[in-house]
Amino acid sequence: MTAETESTRSAAPVTVGPPRAAADRVPVGGPPRRLRAEPPFTASLVAVDCVAVLLGALLLTAEQRDSALLMQLTVGVAALNAHAGLYRSAALAPVPSVLDELPALAARAAVAWCTAAALLAAQAPDRALGPAALTSAYALHLACVTGCRAALHHRRRRAARAHPRSVLVVGPAAAARRLAGTLARHPEYGIRPVGIVATAGIVGGADGAQHEPSPLPELTTTEEIHRAVIQNGVGDAVFTGPAAELVALFSRYGCASWQVAADRGRDTAMNRHLWGFACRRLDVPHDRRAPLAKRLLDVSVAAPMLLVLAPLLLLCAAAIRVSDGPGVLFRQERVGKDGRLFTLLKFRTLRPADEIEAATRWSVADDERMSAVGAFLRRTSLDELPQLWNVLRGDMSLVGPRPERPYFVAEFSRAHPGYAARHRMPVGLTGLAQVHGLRGDTSIEDRCRFDNHYIDHWSLWQDVCILLRTAASLIRPAGS
């Protein structure tokens, strides 16, 4: 088990997290939520394309506009527009002008109509569309799409101005205040800054300048950020400068992160800007197959290991029973993925005085109450072997951030930005921090950084490598 710095260990005791709710979670921020979707708007755009196909078909003869042709056109147009992202909302960027979309709409409508006409000519040459009929139907289709989209975009602009999105502006204090003021002066973007997260106070920088007062609150701790997100319904964080440490934190709080900068060379469309500032998404997409692959690795390794190590487990249990009396297993509540609480199993190496000591005492490595058997089990990490059962149950993974008690999760989440973000992935029996020597009396800040780096760059092969390095380190055990 790692240890915190002296300042944390000597801090005044805090109340253990609130009583367990029905969902069995500790307040480390809810699971990431998606960007606020607008199903009615998307459905309206799809409906517009369907109506446009029907209007265009009215210019064809009765023999030409059969159900097969209409179905091919409708599916083709919808599929091409969806692939091009023409049904997605623009998120923080302003609602696009129909002129911005016209080239993409025109090209895809032309492809759909020409393809449908070619299929019709191949199937029934006597009903083939002539150039005049095809051109007029296509023109009416495009006119309908253009007019209806213009009306829908106008409606969205009015709605965005009337109901702006709450955002937090993140960055050096001066730059964050300037951007917040710019957004407040331009309500057409539908963005309402509700607070400033000065990275000088969060990630350790300092610009050394004196800043004029701002009407917006300046948030300096993770607790204040979390409270602001909940109270104001914040769904987005706008970054004015580099602060990669906070992207994962906002993701844990359910916020999308955006980089806003005046730099040139950004890979963004012309209309994706906020008053001249280029805007791009910062969130790192995750492979949806990752949880399944990780779970398959856990089960395929943990189950055979439990069978192979069964004699060793029985030998450890017998040694504890003879040396320290009854009560071979030690059960303790820990925080898992998405803040869910679970019961972690270990071989008992000493008997705590009471439940409060078990929940709030940081390290027992040098406790005089520990017997020789208990000290040996901790030094060789054999006391952790029962956690293979937690892995098989799905409470844990073989590789991931080490689980901690609710008391310390609350403490470290307040003290270290990004600590709560460790719970984006299942906790593990070992991890990237542990194979880099961050075990025992080492820095929580360093462990937090390694854990989040592991999550952001996860791969199945890296899990295998960490398991192999962990197995190799057992030759020179140092305890945990």
Image: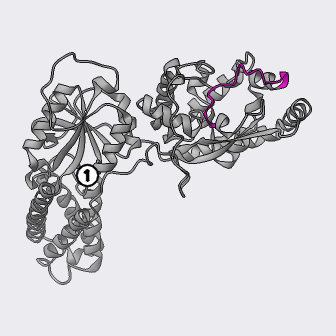
Q: State which region is magenta.
A: 359-373
Quarter of the image for residue 368 reads top right
Quadrant into which the N terminus falls: top right
| Residue 383 image offset from top left, x and y in percent | 76, 31
Determine the residue located farthest toward the right in the rendered image. Answer: 322
Q: Is 343 left, or right, of 433 in this rendering?
A: right
| Residue 198 image offset from top left, x and y in percent | 26, 29
Determine the residue located farthest toward the bottom in the rendered image. Answer: 62
Q: Taking the image as drawn, is residue 122 in sight?
A: no
Circle 1 Cα neighbour tier, 10 Å, few/some/many (<14 / 14–19 / ≥20)? few
Q: Is 421 left, or right, of 53 in this rendering?
A: right
Q: Is 149 left, or right, of 251 in this rendering?
A: left
Query: Can you say whether 58 is above or below 158 in the image?
Result: below
Quadrant into which the C terminus falls: top right
Q: Amino acid at mark 1?
A: Ala
Q: Give the structural element (helix, strand or loop) at label 1.
A: loop
At x 89% / y 29%, what residue is drawn? Answer: 323
Query: Can you say whether 104 is above or below 470 in the image?
Result: below
Query: Can you say whether 57 is above or below 268 in the image?
Result: below
Judged by its main secondary structure, the magenta piece is: loop
At x 49% / y 37%, what residue is drawn? Answer: 410
Q: Which residue is mark 1?
A: 84
Q: Taking the image as drawn, is residue 70 in sight?
A: yes
At x 15% / y 81%, what residue is drawn? Answer: 61
Quarter of the image for residue 155 reads bottom left
Q: Is 443 left, or right, of 324 in this rendering?
A: left
| Residue 11 image offset from top left, x and y in percent | 50, 25
70 or 471, which lies in front? 471
Q: Inspect the magenta stretch and tell me whether residue 361 lies in it.
A: yes
Q: Inspect the magenta stretch and tell me whether residue 253 lies in it.
A: no
